[in-house]
């Protein structure tokens, strides 16, 4: 009889433990991991024509919500040209890329508070980021050094802007001179959780970086 009672007590305890686990799961649901699959810009190796069509399709619809959107240019901009190519919309990020023939240079995206002045100054911020990050080897260090020097000199190196606006505003932006593409995310996309990969002006057929076998110039 004692053995039977012991087995019953163990069974009741096990059931109670399982109930407790379920209750705790309901009261404390697991938090989202924060990982997002949202992305602005072409996939690596994507045909440029396909991306341009996909970007255009992203602007269709009639909702009245604001959307995050990537603006890509036909030619890179100087810092002073940034405000005129935003359509008057809030600029949330600026991507910079120093193009050097046969040298693979990094793209630096700077997150921005509101205001045109900070957008214009974002090239200096990008230069600081390049010099602050550790380089993998001597070549990478020299590439970062010359890129930072050109950014600080005000080169035409701005290749993308992330803006926020309504779909009609974004569609109007596509008709502006110098705008190559505008791609919008769904309205529920969360700021700073999506990837930003600008369509570089030199991408004509495929969205792929060029070779990296050329000499690195002096700053």
Image: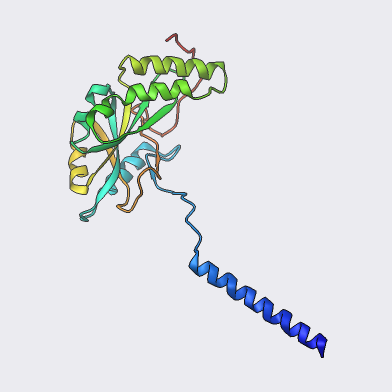
Question: Where is residue 131 drawn, in percent x and y?
Answer: 46, 20
**Residue lying at the far front of the rendered structure:** 2
Residue pictured at 73% horizontal, 79% vertical: 10
Question: Where is residue 23 drawn, in percent x and y?
Answer: 54, 72
41 relative to 216, above or below: below
Q: Is residue 47 visible?
A: yes
Left or right of 103 in this view: 110: left
State the residue in front, 191 or 56.
191
Q: Quadrant of the C terminus?
A: top left
State the residue in front, 3 or 172.
3
Q: Is residue 104 visible?
A: no
Is the image coloured rainbow, by chain, by secondary structure, or in one colour?
rainbow
**Residue lying at the far top of the rendered structure:** 218
Residue pictured at 53% horizontal, 67% vertical: 25
Question: Where is residue 209 drawn, in percent x and y?
Answer: 45, 28
- Image mark count: 0
Question: Where is residue 176 drawn, in percent x and y?
Answer: 18, 34
Left or right of 173 in this view: 161: right
**Residue lying at the far bottom of the rendered structure:** 1
Q: Quadrant of the N terminus?
A: bottom right
Residue pictured at 36% horizontal, 34% vertical: 198
Residue pictured at 32% horizontal, 26% vertical: 122
């Amino acid at each position: 009889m004692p053995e039977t009672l012991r087995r019953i007590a163990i069974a009741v305890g096990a059931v109670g433990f399982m109930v407790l686990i379920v209750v705790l799961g309901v009261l404390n649901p697991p938090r989202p991991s924060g990982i997002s699959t949202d992305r602005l810009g072409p996939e690596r190796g994507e045909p440029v024509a396909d991306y341009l069509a996909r970007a255009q399709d992203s602007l269709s619809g009639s909702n009245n919500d604001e959307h995050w959107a990537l603006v890509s240019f036909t030619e890179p901009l100087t810092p002073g040209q940034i405000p005129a190519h935003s359509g008057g919309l809030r600029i949330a990020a600026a991507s910079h890329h120093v193009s050097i023939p046969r040298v693979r240079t990094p793209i630096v995206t700077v997150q921005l508070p509101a205001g045109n002045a900070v957008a214009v100054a974002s090239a200096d911020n990008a230069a600081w980021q390049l010099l602050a990050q550790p380089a993998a080897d001597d070549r990478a260090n020299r590439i970062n050094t010359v890129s930072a020097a050109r950014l600080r000199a005000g080169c035409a190196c701005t290749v993308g802007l992330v803006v926020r606006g309504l779909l009609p505003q974004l569609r109007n932006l596509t008709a502006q001179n110098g705008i190559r593409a505008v791609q919008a995310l769904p309205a529920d996309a969360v700021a700073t959780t999506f990837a930003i990969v600008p369509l570089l002006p030199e991408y004509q057929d495929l969205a792929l970086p060029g070779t990296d076998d050329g000499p690195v110039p002096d700053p």
